[in-house]
Amino acid sequence: MTNDRRIILHIGTVKTGTTSIQKTLYRSRKQLPDYGLYFPGLGDTFHHNFTFTALFIEDPRILPGFIKKGIVTDPDTAERLRYLKKKLINEIERSGSNDFIVSAENLSLPLFTEDAVENAAKFISNYFDKVTIIIYIRHYNDFLKSEIQQRIKNGHSDMCTEAILNNLMNNPNSGAMYDKAVGKWIRTFCRENVIVRPFDRAAFKNGELIDDFFSHLGFKPESIPINRVLSNESIGKNAVAFLEQYNQKYPMFIDKKANTKRGRSKSYFPVNLLPEDEKFDLDIKFTKEQADTLNNQIDYINSLFADDHQFEHVTYGEGPNIFPTVDEVPSAFYIELINNYSKRAESILDKCDSIENEVSLLRRKLINKANGELLEIYLSCLDSRLTTIKNILLWLKYRILGLPGFDKEFYSRAYSGSAVRVKDPLLHFIVRGVYRCYNPNPDFNTKKYVLEHPEIIASRENALIHYNRNNF
């Protein structure tokens, strides 16, 4: 490994373009090492929310990634952690880049406690000389609305929108407190190693999140061939109301297990099938106590921002918060949703038909190939002296008794080019013709019968004689 190695931890927060950053990094993995940056694949597809986080928290079984895999016992958990740690170390050791980046917004959530940060720091010190933490922060008015929408969208919570807001505002472990998200990292890694950026287009380098991300880590984004990705689309007002009811009726998890009664139980609702919708918005009425709490948090985060970008305080107001309800969702929304699902189902069925046709064609090719090989074996009986002697004895027998199903006149006409050379068509059929798949009468297809009764291939039995023996 090279000297002076640095690990970059992109820790979120949620709803600050983390998916776009992660997918950009993931899709640019092949190019990034040429510029001194390595983004590992740890098994979480394009992010490290579960794989990296699991190694350092007290009980990784609370992570959705563990729940979806059904990892609940201590031995299974220990085995999984050994696997993840080995995979991470292998990625670190195989990387020749100076900068190794991990991106997991779970690292800014309360589940990643101060003890977890210290556990991570001990591990990191064994492999890296420097650490840079980068985190994006969104203003509360935007964050709360976006977080409500995200929790409804991902299905991990069966709470209604009002309950989610109350949880965010009143539960200190909800993840809505800036000082908890950032402070634990500053206390462990020191302020100079933590980059705190506002999630605001006006503050971004070139007005672009990806450019801002790379430039604040010391890279020139314009000089790197980055595969930029914009992702994690929002859902609208009617979709929020609908999915709120859907999640309550069919929660994604029950007793820390995937709910098998829920369609796509281990996956998010396919939001790309949702119809066009009104923008989801909330006019949040903060109480005086809530506003004071949030403004203290804003003062804290402003102390970490540059002077040219500061968050404004929230204001308190009177009256209840108004949330979208399923009763207000128009029937047109459901009609379009059902139609979108029908079109998706039709598309899947078309693909299944196409695959089935390809499989059928391949099967026919294989069967034809196999049949061809089987027939080759049967036809090779012509070259066997022992079979010829055996069949001459059969001819003597059937010359006297007669062979049912053998039409001498038909055979002579159908294969005159061959049979005319011999005085006895029956002899020709028994000794040679049957192994050339000549037919003994117009209704008996020798080739078809041989392929339908492959047992006669090994025994080299005459197809017509086999037919007579088993049908009369």
Image (spheres, rainbow, N blue to C red):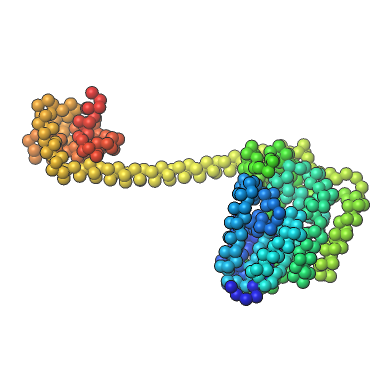
Residue 427: where, in percent of width, then height? 11, 35
Looking at the picture, does residue 172 appear above or below residue 34?
above
Observer-nearest of 445 and 382 = 382
**Residue 368 in sight in this render:** yes
Which residue occupies the extreme front position in the image?
75
The image quadrant where one finds the N terminus is bottom right
Residue 282: where, in percent of width, then height? 81, 49
Residue 278: where, in percent of width, then height? 75, 47
Residue 145: where, in percent of width, then height? 79, 51
The image quadrant that residue 421 belongs to is top left
Q: Residue at x 17, y 36 (%)?
A: 414
Position of residue 458 in the picture relative to residue 300 (left or right): left
**Residue 108 in sight in this render:** no
Observer-nearest of 471 and 119 = 119
Q: Residue at x 63, y 39 (%)?
A: 260
Q: Residue at x 79, y 46 (%)?
A: 164
Which residue occupies the extreme bottom position in the image?
3
Observer-nearest of 296 and 144 = 296
The image quadrant that residue 387 belongs to is top left
The image quadrant where one finds the C terminus is top left
Position of residue 34 in the picture relative to residue 243 (left or right): left
Looking at the picture, does residue 465 appear above or below residue 321?
above
Position of residue 333 in the picture relative to residue 30 (left or right): right
Q: Residue at x 67, y 49 (%)?
A: 61
Which residue occupies the extreme top position in the image?
472
